[in-house]
Image: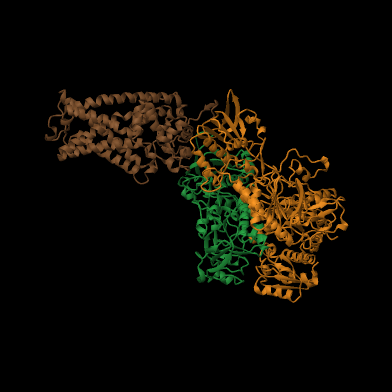
Amino acid sequence: MTAALEAAEMGRKVTLVEREPYLGGRVIRMAKYFPKLCPPGCGTEINFRRLRANPRVTIMVDSQVASITGARGDFTATIKTRPRYVNEKCTACGDCEKVCPVERSDSYNYGMKNTKAIYLADALAMPFRHSIDMSVCKGADCGECVKVCKYEAIDLAMEEKTTTITASAVVHATGWKPYDASRIENLGYGQIKNVINNVEMERLASVSGPTEGRILRRDNGEPPSVVAMVQCAGSRDENHLPYCSSICCLVSIKHANYVREQYPDSDVYVFYIDLRAPGKYESFYRKAMEDPKIHFIKGKVARIEEDESGRAVVTAEDIIGGGKTRVACDLVVLATGMEPESKSVAPLMAKFNPDGFILEELQGDAGLIACGVASGPFDVTTSTQNSTAAALKAVQAGARR
Amino acid sequence: MADITKTGAYICSGCGIGDCVNVEALATVATKEGKVAFAKTHPMLCGAEGVALIKGDIASGAVTAVSIAACSPRVCYDIFDFGESAVLDRIDIREKVAWSQEPGHLETQALAEDYIRMGMVKIKAMELPVPFIPEEPSKTIMVVGGGIAGMTAALNAAKAGYKVELVEKEPALGGFANSLGMRLPDKAPYDAPMENDIGQLVEDVIGDDYINVHLGATINKVSGGPGIFDVSLSNGTDKAFRAGAIVLATGFNPYDVKKLTKLGADLPGVVGSVEFESMLKEGKAPPKRIVFILCAGSRDDEHLPYCSSVCCASSLKQAWLARQANPEASVTVIYRDIRTTGNMEFFYKQVQQDPGIFLTKGETPQVAREGDELSVTAENTLLGGKVKFMADMVVLATGMVPSTLDPSVKVDKPEDQMQDFDRDQVGKASILKLDYRQGPEVPDLKLGFPDSHFICFPYETRRTGIYAAGTVRHPMDASVAKNDAIGAAMKAIQCVEMVPRGEAVHPRARDLSHPEFAMERCTQCKRCTVECPFGAINEDEKTNPIPVKSRCRRCATCMGACPVQIINFKNYSIPMVGAMIKAIDMPDEDEERPRVLAFICENDAMPALEMAGINRLRINPVVRFVPLRCMGSLNLQWIADALSSGWDGIMLLGCKHGDDYQCHNVKGSELATIRASKVQETLDRLMLESERILVDAVQISDWQRLPKMIDGFVEQISEMEPNPYKGF
Amino acid sequence: MADTQTLTIQPDPAFVKSIMENGGETLKKCFQCGNCSVVCNISPDVSPFPRKEMVWAQWGLSDRLLGNADVWICHGCADCTTHCPRGARPGDVMAALRNISFRRFAGFDFMGDLLAKPSGLFLLLLVPIVWIGGMIAVASKEGFMSMKPIVFSNMMPVPAIDAVFLPAVGLAVVSALLGLSRFWRQLKENSPGLATPPGSIISAALAVIKGIAIHEKMGKCVTNSYRFSSHLMTMYGFFALMATTGLVALMYWINKLQLGSVAATPLALSHPVKILGNIGALLAVSGVTMIVARRYGQDGDKTGSLVYYDSHFIFILYGTILTGIGAETLRLLGLAAPAFGIYYVHLVLVFTLLVYAPFSKFSHLMYRFVAMTYARMGKRERPGGAG
């Protein structure tokens, strides 16, 4: 969104292609940003506002780029738009949801909640329209939603659409996905209920999430009294992601804040290798260190086991304190790293490094630009910053001098 | 003023509105009380038929102003877009009424009717904005600072076809990078230091005929504003030019190593990392035993409280180079945390493998001289407890201080005349010499880094059209700084493109409205010039305000500040909101139907309120919401209007302020809070309950909490006597 | 570890280099996360290994490393290596430290040098080849090759064997004991907290023997789980073979000194001692074959990297067992020339295995036993182990 808006506000025409039915990516699903602990919805809303005010941006949701041909200054892209089965007449009034008989696991909430087969991803969703998950919808045999919709907004026969556009530059802003923590065998993710990952924690802390913002044990819904943050769950690890994902330390400090804010008697343990709070973020770390109930322990967690009461027992070597330490936790948050989505969503012309990042130096002067986490593991502000840079690089591809 | 006889009210009954309220009655209110030409109801205004209806009325000349009572303006914005063909206002009776109120209830109907009343007077007071376009705007970009960031910004602006004036105070380009031997890797596989190629960058800049380089130059003055920055500088000769936007890329100064006496900076053999770098660059062989102490003066409240971000990686680089220069050397590195984020991790990994480099975590390092040798002790090491290392040389890895700081600078003003922005200029290096009423340099929030809304608007300083880039903005390494500079160049380009179109820049991008000053009634109180968060208003010698409109972010804080209400926008004004406040049907004192007025920030509190509606939460029906551009635009006249028209309570729902402020206009909510506290004092003096006014911060994610909070306030108000001014 | 005193640390790049050359070449990759100490099922809670050994190794702190019982309590499961996020292979570093220890403690540096490199192999083999060859030349019966049935002692009579092996093994035992006493001293000096072992040496040793008997620790290995069975088989097979050898010698001398009359070699296949020997051979060959298959097979690297030290030991042991079986089989098949030939090779290998034991990886058996006993005395090792 940032790259699109920056180029559009300068005066260029932009087509914004998004795979999901809504804009906002991973960020809109988060409860708060570090270090200000402010809601990402605020900045996202500003961007939505900028989009609303700017007809130079064509928004294509439910869409993926199928192919790109051409060269810098003259690309042709074929874009496939999945049928949403709900057209632009939808007012998001929600009548359809009431009658829909089928539920689906909500990927927006990482499966921690269900929605109807016809659903609105979030109250802040842009575009503010429902969509249908055809993998569970009973289709025309049911048709309840069609009957109840006053606005003729539901079209169960909608088909995939192909659009061809031309462009002078291509910006890849395909973002990331959380590393699949179940691949880190000894951490019990997927086996132990009270072991969750950091994006799930964001949903738990989010008022629009499955628990309406209350951080609760995943097995019995009880409030937790001991919570552990496990750093480098996948990152800085040759067996998983060899690079540092840059953000997880700060995300975990943020999570420690969530827990401490909700439960003043709780204890939070943060297990880390190196606590990385670069630049001005140091003060965010410092503030957390002043809380006597947030315990920072240098030592990587290498074992999580479930005890008979369902708690997750975390073991690490306390390198400075000495000896192995075991903490029985009501909730364990794995600070899973960021894996670029680029390989799975942007085959196209761009070249990747072995980790899947689209690095500038690999593209040459091809007019193929990457920003945000597609180009490296960055935090939100750095992504905003290099997306703005990407917009200029894109503009240059079309500039005549 | 929109012509009310040429105004049409369009009321939608779709999305449950018709089931909740009597829309025909709303239409009657619009025509009878609002006196609009006509009011039409429709079951689906956003459908093709509904839109055609409105467009037809505009095309036929029946209306020049359109008031649509339907859903929130946050949706269907593209459908209800009539461009400049009509004044447009949207009254939200879907999220704020139909989706959040009890259908068919008396108070629900009253609420919707009040919104119609408010909407009718509002549109009457609105006009299409006439864009302000400065005379002879320039599209040239001035870049201040000829280091990596500055040169990168210049080159990239030039590549996009913009002329650049590059100002460097030293006699040569290159900046801090000139002092480096080798540099950190910025390309895969990130496994070894790279040749310092700053020379290539300098050559590219010099060879670019779109870039005009001023070496050894000092800025004498920058006046004007975005689009029309008039710059005068001298480097031997005096020069002057006009620029449209400025990139501030003046970089950093290394922290003064001499201050680190606790780390033995005064002992022979103890050097700072800058000195060590030049040793390496000059090819002097380093001694056999070297100990690096990281975070020397960083992450330290006595020195720099923040982390300087690059010292870990650059010390690893120096350790590696020292080993190259003297293969006999053993290099010990004492760190607190190794912070090689992202792909720099690969570099750490590589350097670690040098058998002559020894790394350990260690805290509270101390350096002492023991005969011919130096000793370094550290606690909490990986080697177990407190340990001591003997050394021939100790390198203190010093951090970065933004070049905007100069502790020697004082502000020559008596303390009682100091404004916040005056205090802000204390200790600020003289760089831009802005001819701004609020001081010559870009303000910071703390630590000297130019203030910006750190997460969402990384480039915006509190001076419109001036964008900070590189280490002056945040400690960062060269490769990040390069990208940062390209982004800042983009913002500068946007600015020079948008200003001549009369558009506001971020965050109210493309807004064409701007404040107009009725100077004949000005009392020279200086409130507006002092309170503008962006320093947009200068003063003449008689302290008359001189707005420099291209500096304006359109937040309307000046409008809120003005005690005589002379500052207004075409589509947003004190009379407009005042009329809305007075427009409602105020129940009588004995009806026990209190009325609460809520001013809400349209960026956060309003979407939060709407999300409560979308989630079908009940919102107290006695409250009428008036969205404001920013809480900073709240004028006390409105409070007076509200109290005198019988409102029982007033809520100001803005954003968080303080160090972690969330206000998009930096100061808006803070100023509103100060203003409200003054009213509260007055109320107390008049023996009226100051609790009638509530100031609170609402985040966009507070939609679940918001209705409860409102209920709480209404309950508190209900317990009080009704406003005694009711019915007056 | 709230040590109050300040220790002066001098990094020793030369020692770092020697660890790297002895199988721990990845050690500098460690970034001290402590993952290894936790994934290890054997490592105790209090000052666990191998994280601390890794940092000492990175700094080359030889004193701390070599007098450290933990280096031996480590059983080379390689779970640390499997899970190491940095590819630092702590398991290899621990193995390298053991390799260095064999040499350090055994003394006679030239022996260690010969065992460390393939180039030394020739010289090492030359000694038994010549010595045993010489004894055969002197002591063999005239025309032993054509005598029926095939009797190996016709070629190398028992006294001749004893003449070679008793002094040689005696020498080995002496240097082993010397090594052990050096090791014991180092343990006392450099294993802080264990310096005044409160427990009795006997009960500690018995407990350790019990643990070893069931391979309690190796049973906890995950990555190298194969080792539990293979090493167990090898160990028992080897002990059975050693017992057989001892019994055969005993039986010989009983007959010879007319202390009684027992069966003489070659023993019938049904003879209990023969059965013991054959079972031992079967166990040992199966065990070592499994080890060889895993370590030299596909993904063998995951079990721990191989250095010459390992290979030397494995193949001498394997060769000894295989030639033993080969000699017996050929003898039973009545193929005189190959049988005697192989038997000769067998004797050479047995010599190599036993006589050089204190300097080879074979000595892990005694160092590990001693270190574990010491640790058990110091209560570092609790019944059931830690982890």
Chain A image colour: green
Residue B288: x and y in percent read: 53, 30
Answer with left or right where residue A88 lies relative to residue C353.
right
The answer to whether residue C264 of the structure is visible from this angle is no
**B649 in relation to C158, above or below:** below
**B56 in relation to C250, above or below:** below
- Which residue is at the front of the view, B668 or B42? B668
Chain coloured orange: B
The image quarter in which residue C339 lies: top left
Residue B163: x and y in percent read: 69, 56
Answer with left or right where residue B465 lies relative to residue A84.
right
Residue B56: x and y in percent read: 71, 76
- Which residue is at the front of the view, A248 or B302? B302
The answer to whether residue C235 of the structure is visible from this angle is yes
- Which residue is at the front of the view, B280 or C29? B280
**C122 in relation to A229, above or below:** above
The image quarter in which residue B63 lies: bottom right
Looking at the image, what colour scheme do you see?
by chain
Residue B703: x and y in percent read: 66, 56
Answer with left or right where residue A98 lies relative to residue B541.
left
Chain C image colour: brown
Q: Quadrant of the C terminus of chain B?
A: bottom right
The image quarter in which residue B587 lies: bottom right
- Residue at the location (73% across, 38% down)? B407
**Number of numbered discs present?**
0
Q: Quadrant of the N terminus of chain B?
A: bottom right
The extreme bottom residue here reads: B60
